[in-house]
Amino acid sequence: MQTAVVHLHNLFRWIILVLLLLSILRSYSGWRSKKIFSPADSRLWLFTLISAHINLLLGLYLLLFGRFGIFSAGLPQGVELMKDKFYRFFWIEHPFAMIIAVILITLGRRMAKKNVPDEQKFKKAFWFFLIALIIILASIPWGFREVVGRPSI
């Protein structure tokens, strides 16, 4: 069960990255070209939002009940949380950064519902999505990262 949730969490990482890149490109082109906000833009942002929230829930499950979860495994005896790179990353840094990224994605999607000019919708959504992407890319346990690296697939 745990392995399946980890693989699903990993799969959603790629889905979110693709949808976020598409959302950034659409919002940037809409902003710069002064396009009219369309239902297709709203749907893309909605799918990005839904994927991010699903992955957040999977990640919180892993944080709390996963193989190295707070409630299922606990902190090994003699290990100090903030001094151990592995536990600090997976219990503090990664969850905190991803929650911030999901909040930014939510704010970007929220722009679709605001009654503001379309250019402003695109511009604000672009910046929210771009900052979320940067945070996500910095917080993923990429394979090349020391101690916390995980396979990409």
Image (cartoon, rainbow, N blue to C red):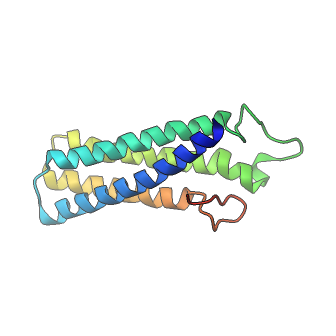
Residue 33 vs residue 66, the one in the foreground: 66
Q: Is residue 24 left or right of residue 7?
A: left
Q: Residue furthest right?
A: 78
Tell me residue 147's x, y (percent): 73, 61
Residue sitting at 22 percent across and 43 percent down?
112
Tell me residue 33's x, y (percent): 13, 65
Q: Is residue 121 left or right of residue 95?
A: left
Residue sitting at 62 percent across and 64 percent down?
143
Q: Residue furthest top?
A: 71
Tell me residue 13's x, y (percent): 48, 52
Q: Quadrant of the C terminus?
A: bottom right
Residue sitting at 16 percent across and 44 percent down?
39
Location of residue 47 with respect to 30 vertically, above or below: above
How many numbered markers are drawn? 0
Location of residue 134 with respect to 65 vertically, above or below: below
Tell me residue 66's x, y (percent): 67, 38
- Tell me the quarter of the picture where residue 14 sits: bottom left
Location of residue 33 with respect to 90 vertically, above or below: below
- Tell me the quarter of the picture where residue 69 sits: top right
Residue sitting at 66 percent across and 60 percent down?
149
Residue 144 vs residue 97, the one in the foreground: 144
Q: Is residue 140 left or right of residue 120?
A: right
Q: Is residue 124 left or right of residue 130?
A: left
Q: Quadrant of the N terminus?
A: top right
